[in-house]
Image (spheres, grey):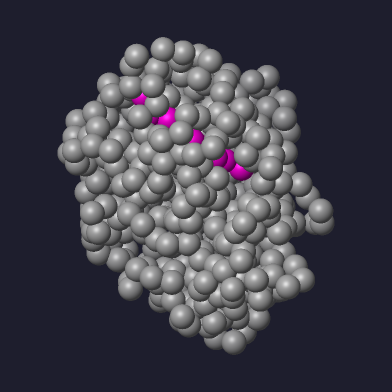
Amino acid sequence: MKDVILSIDQGTTGSTALFLDRDVQVVASHNTEFPNHYPQEAWVEHDIHEIWSSVSSAIQKAKQKALAHRIVAIGITNQRETCLFWDRKTGEPIHRALVWQDRRTADFCQELKDQGLEERIRSKTGLVLDPYFSGTKAKWTLDHVEGAREKAKRGDILFGTIDTWLIWKLCGAHVTDPSNASRTLLYNIETQDWDEELLSIFDVPRECLPKVVDNAGIMGHTKGVDCLDDGIPVSGVAGDQQSALFGQACFEAGEAKCTYGTGAFVLMNTGTSRITSNNRLLTTIAWRLNGVTSYALEGSAFVAGAAVQWLRDGLGIIRSAPEVEELATSVESSKGVAFVPALAGLGAPHWRPEARGVLCGITGGTTKAHVARAVLEGVALQNVDILKAMSADANCPIKALKVDGGMSKNNFLMQFQADVLGVDCIRPTVLETTALGAAFLAGLGVGIWSDTEAVRTAWKRDRLFVAKMDQEKKENFLSLWQRAISKA
């Protein structure tokens, strides 16, 4: 039998089980989808039973593809801000999980801003005050489920993000890691503990909160799980974007990654120094290993892959997403056409939710190929703004950009990203870096890899995109981008 690590990647619309061997080869993987629930406008919920069913199904289907293998460790990565409470004895949730996209606590966030508390909260958590994070969701649940707060004070119900609930379901331990804790608005990233002042502001009892443990290390062993044997160590956990940063072996200050999904998620390792952003980027904990904490700056663009979906579904100029590269490269340039992907507002570092997408520079000679090329260029150019802000905040030049996610398969986009950023882009052989990071952490936790240097050696590069655009041409693109974004 061959030893493998099971990585559970629990996402917003589905759960993936990935088996990885010691040579960092994907032995098997399977994704099982589950529904989102929308009880009211701007409310988004998950049925936790449906999440568990999707996880269990993904594991069973992946096991069927890898029959002659033995699971020696389990890693978990998750949608970070989705959270719930459940009964300590029965395991039953007291309410559906509130998803990171849920906006029902917007008015409460505004109340706290009106009270002048945002900067105080940001100084402790590194986060902006927004319904995105799970602290306001915890308060809402305790406020709206009868008797919940008293039960929480007694420790009869337990709080957790999805990683916490999965660990509890697998092995009965009530724990989380610093990367997920740092997204709750309840955790002080300086003192590395749940913060009494924050718990008071959000009215969440400490008694219901999980213990915060290092990202790699044995948290418990599986017991009584239908889809897994008893006794398998759960030994690695991290929130999805931090897990992708780890999966890309970005272990030194200045190393950064961009995950190109529906949006673009950029994280930059700032080492053991916590950097407070002057550009409203998020300061977050990357991970804690052997008691040593690494921090990161985070910035997100709301639209990346969604722009290609718009070309397909909105404009109908391509039939499938992979076609966009061939169409874009059928012309030598975008011929002065510029696209700002503000289809859902502008994220970091602009933070203009009211902004709208812009397509400008159109002439009678503009074709759908020019538009396709401009869309891909716009996706890359918005990331330049985020990475420049990160570099300025950290006073640290970006060494290289590791790239992953579905759009990173697009060679034109990756080369253009390297050119306008002025640094090389590096694509790994395993693009599921979120799951890969959890597997690396789990392997560290049981000694398959001795340290991060061993992980770096195990990480494999697929392709290097070398920045080669001349300075004048690059400046022309950046100037055109700035003019376009001013119109958005």
Q: Which residues are magenta?
A: 4-12
Q: Is residue 116 above or below residue 47?
A: below
Q: Is residue 213 above or below residue 443?
A: below
Q: Is residue 2 magenta?
A: no
Q: Nearer the viewer, residue 459 or 89?
A: 89
Q: Position of residue 38 (x, y in %)?
A: 78, 50
Quadrant of the image for the N terminus? top left
Q: Position of residue 130 (x, y in %)?
A: 58, 67
Q: Residue at x 42, y 62 (%)?
A: 211
Q: Is residue 6 magenta?
A: yes
Residue 442 in sight: yes
Locate residue 294: give its quadrant: bottom left
Residue 268 in sight: no
Q: Is residue 326 above or below residue 333?
A: above
Q: Residue at x 49, y 39 (%)?
A: 223
Q: Residue at x 23, y 37 (%)?
A: 447
Q: Nearer the viewer, residue 214 or 325?
A: 214
Q: Residue at x 19, y 41 (%)?
A: 451
Q: Position of residue 386 (x, y in %)?
A: 42, 53
Quadrant of the image for the C terminus? bottom right
Locate residue 21: give its quadrant: top left
Q: Nearer the viewer, residue 306 or 38?
A: 38
